[in-house]
Amino acid sequence: MIAGGGTGGHLFPGVAIAEELRARAPDAAIRFVGTKRGIEARVLPDLGWDLDLIEVSGLKTVGALGALRGMARLPRAYWQARRVVKQFAPDAVIGVGGYASGPVVLAARLRGIPTAICEQNSIPGLTNKILGRLVRSVFLSFDMSRKFFKPSKIVMTGNPVRRELVQKLLAASPAQTDRVHVLVCGGSQGAVAVNDLASTALIALAKQHALAITHQTGDRDLEPITARYRDAGVTASCHAFIKDMATAYRAADLIIGRAGATTVAELAIAGKPAILIPYPSAADNHQELNAREMADKGAALMFRQAELTAEKLADALRPLLTDTTRRTEMGATMKSLAKPGAAAAVIDWCEAQPAARRE
């Protein structure tokens, strides 16, 4: 049983874990538990995964009234979670973050079922901080997260990435051309600030450098960003959403984007140098910490959005566009941080657990 979600950053590592188990054991029973408001309610049915829903909401960054509403929902959420755990009778329960994971992991823990959590970011969310005290193991992606959990529980797996994406990312990149391929991706929904900064900087640089630009804009910015490139006489391939991100990563020589846990995990597997502009409103500023860890190791450059201008971004890009050796070195460092076996490590743990007692 895989519990949690709410956002893609929580959900898709869970999907990667489910895919790994299904590949090993095609007849395995796998069930997700989430909420109707989370991304899981829209995505999982289309992917063919079973999903149970419980009624629970967040306690943090929702204001005083939202927190009170969330507290009031907890008793009912726990009993709903207890029911789905009892009915499904899982051999193990993995919490992947988000408030839906709390009641489910707790219910499983009280029934003696082996439990663990995945923490994708450098700073754990409230749910995982609490659950970390209850579960048997904690799967981490960043060294910085170690201080939040008991050392004996920690397993440094990395962030699980979907099986098909890993296989594509590990394939050889296309042959280099005389143009430098730059990929801009602010996330699946785009990022207004990243779109504005990157497009302005790249338009300025395209006057002196041979660039191939691919830009994922999100729905809202597709028309204005496309028009900005066109009006400047710069050729750019703009998309609201890039479905085949593996191909886009592999074609890129350099990537500009946010620093969500899934993004940095994919960049590492792809082995591509990056300029990271963390989302400034991320909970506990975790994107900046994610990006800083990559930058400190030499795999990326990091800039705070509030301190960055298009001119500064262009100044940072210019030497990377002309220095193939530096890009190669950064890419190799990024590749050294990859953990493509993260999902496999989680399933290895599940298979090693003693059978849960049954009531």
Image: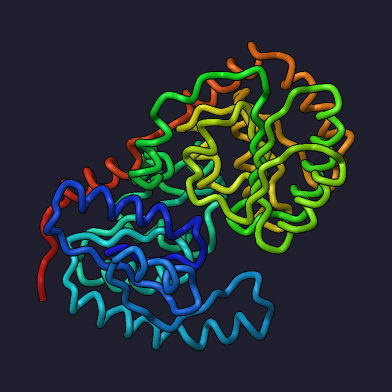
Tell me the quadrant of the picture where the N terminus can be found.
Answer: bottom left
Q: Indicate how the structure is coloured in the image.
A: rainbow
> Percent from the top left, x then y, of residue 277?
71, 43
The residue nearer to you, when weighing 325 against 204, is 204
The residue nearer to you, when weighing 195 against 232, is 232
Residue at point 32% right, 78% down? 81
Above or below: residue 314 compared with residue 228: above
Residue at point 80% right, 44% down? 229
Tell me the quadrant of the picture where the C terminus can be found.
Answer: bottom left
Q: Is residue 245 left or right of residue 276?
A: left
Classify residue 272 by image quadrant.
top right
> Percent from the top left, x then y, of residue 176?
56, 19
Residue at point 22% right, 51% down? 21
The residue nearer to you, when weighing 49 against 344, is 49
Classify residue 90 by image quadrant.
bottom left
The residue nearer to you, when weighing 238 against 187, is 238
> Percent from the top left, x then y, of residue 74?
45, 82
Residue sitting farthest toward the top: 325
> Percent from the top left, x then y, of residue 323?
71, 14
Residue at point 54% right, 82% down? 70
Above or below: residue 298 compared with residue 5: above
Classify residue 233 by image quadrant.
top right
